[in-house]
Structure formats: C-alpha cells, structure tokens
Image (spheres, rainbow, N blue to C red):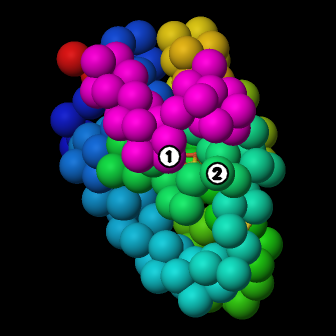
Amino acid sequence: MKLDVKPEEWRGKHHPFMRNDEFASIFGPEVARDVNLLEQRASSVCPSCRGKCCQMIGCELYSPHLDFCPIYEYRPLKCRLFFCPKVTADEESLRIAEHMSNIILNRFGPGIIFDSPPAVLGEQQLQQSMGEKAKSIIQKLEREEIAPDRARGLLLNLIRADMT
Ligand code: SF4
Ligand code: SF4
C-alpha cells in the first residue's frame, strides 16, 4: 500500500488536526474505510451520549455548553480513532476496529497506540501548541463571558491558524 505521507514525516511536521482527506492520505484507504464503517455503527448508538467520549479522551475542545463539536471537520486523531465498547459491541464492529488498529500498529509501530483503539498520535502536539489557548476559550464560554457561536469561531480560527 503506497501512502502520500510517510509516518516519520507526519510525526515531524503535521499537527494533530486534520481533514478527512488528510487522514486518508496519512493512514491509507483501508483505515479510512474502517473508520467510516465504525462511524456508521456509532451513528446509531452515539446520539444519546452527548459527548461522553469527548470527556473520556480529555478533549480540550469539549464543553457541555456547546451543542456539537466546534471543529468537527478538523477533529484530531485521538477523536477520530476512538470508538468505545458500545460501538464495538457486536462481532463485526470489533473485527473492523481490530483490523484498523492492526494496520496502524504495523505502520507506526508500538508505543503509539496504548489501546486498540484509541491511538494517541499527535497528543503531545495538541497539548503543547493548542491546549492552553483552547482551554482559555472554553473557560470564557463556561463563565458566560462569550457566547457559544463566538467560542466556536475562536476555536475554529485557532485550529486553522495552526494548520497554515
Ligand atoms: S463512542 Fe461511545 S462514548 Fe462516544 S458518543 Fe459514541 S457511544 Fe458515547
Ligand atoms: S474533537 Fe470534537 S468530537 Fe472530537 S473529542 Fe473533541 S469535542 Fe469531541
């Protein structure tokens, strides 16, 4: 399988946020397909959760004051590759998750994924470059100093600036 971006290049230069096309370019069509299949399964079990996994993975961009993900099109790897046991409860979904995890593990090596899934690629960069600024925006939102729309706009700008 030939991929556009080598893992070592990605690790060195790329931020944790990415669009769908970048994700497929880095991880390849098989992983992108597996994630799509798991997202289809997730769409039937996730809506009632209201962001439980956003909290479980410690996403800096989550707030219960926001009705939906403020940066969904750019969501980071730790979000894209996380599927809780509710999503992988049936045999077929678990098989897909294991297939996806094995490809990533083989390509990026051990120590990158501490569970199968989630993967934690890019986590450090997220904390260093974005975490404090994102936290400050979320805190202002939760103190009601800024409105949800304003917070979403600021978070999107933060990520787009980091991606340029
Ligand atoms: S992945 Fe799991 S924790 Fe996250 S929203 Fe879906 S069901 Fe809830
Ligand atoms: S990027 Fe969005 S959907 Fe993903 S964990 Fe963070 S707040 Fe939740």
**Is 34 a magenta residue?**
no
Determine whether label 1 and label 2 are within 8 Å by CB.
Answer: yes
Q: Amino acid at mark 2?
A: His
Closest to the observer: 157 or 1? 157
Please give the range of residues in magenta.
136-162
For label 1, the SS is: helix
Establish if 138 lies above or below 89.
Answer: above
Mark sitting on residue 148 = 1
Q: Residues within 10 Å of mark 1 (few under 14, many from 20)?
A: some
Magenta stretch mostly in which secondary structure?
Answer: helix
Depicted 152 relative to depicted 90: above or below: above
Q: Position of residue 135 (x, y in %)?
A: 64, 24
Q: Is residue 155 left or right of residue 47?
A: left
At numbered mark 2, what does the secondary structure look like: helix, strand or loop? loop
The amino acid at mark 1 is Pro
Q: Residue at horizontal 51%, vertical 11%?
A: 129
In-front residue for pair 93/102: 93
Kindly identify which numbered label has been placed on residue 65: 2
Residue drawn at 50 percent across, 42 percent down: 147
Residue that appears at 72% across and 73% down:
49
